Image (cartoon, helix red, strand yellow):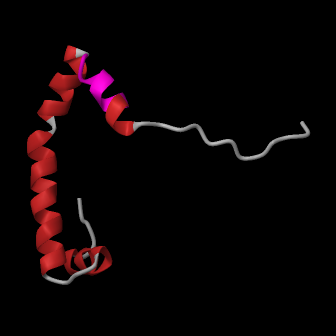
Amino acid sequence: MESDGYAPVPMDLDAELGEAFKRPEFKSAYDALEDEYSSLSVLLGARKAAGLTQEEIAQRMGPWSY
């Protein structure tokens, strides 16, 4: 193995996503996640607006107890 060098493979994310959306099962699964990602976006925006880091949020939440 003389040449084990780094050889990145170019990827066009928009083209890949466009192809994936042609599959009905992908679009259905993607759409099902809309509420979850929308909620996460709101939470992330609020954290940033409050000027808090992820670590600070975790500290404020305290240890998890089950």
The image position of residue 33, as x and y in percent, is 16, 38
- Asked which quadrant contains residue 1, the reply is top right
Residue at the outermost bottom position: 51
Rendered residue at 29%/73% (across/down): 54
The magenta segment is: 16-22
Examine the structure image and report whether residue 20 is included in the region drawn in magenta. yes
Instruction: Give residue 2's position: percent from left, percent from top.
Output: 91, 40
Q: Is residue 6 above or below residue 62?
A: above
- The vertical placement of 37 against 41, above or below, is above
Eyeballing the image, is 16 above or below 23? below
Q: Is residue 12 left or right of residue 56?
A: right
**Height in image: 19 above or below 64?**
above
Q: Main secondary structure of the magenta part?
A: helix
Judging depth in this view, the residue of 12 and 64 nearest the camera is: 12
x and y percentages locating residue 48 in the rendered image: 18, 76
Seen from the viewer's position, the closer of residues 41 and 64 is 41
- The total of numbered circles placed on residues is 0
Residue 50 lies within the magenta run: no
Q: Quadrant of residue 42?
A: bottom left
* Residue 15 coordinates in the image, percent (x, y): 35, 30
Q: Residue at x 25, y 16 (%)?
A: 23
Of residue 60 and residue 16, the one placed in the foreground of this image is 16
Quadrant showing the C terminus: bottom left
Residue at the image position 47 percent from the left and 37 percent from the top? 11
Q: Splitting the image into 4 quarters, where does residue 61 fall?
A: bottom left
Residue at the (31%, 31%) spot, across then down: 17
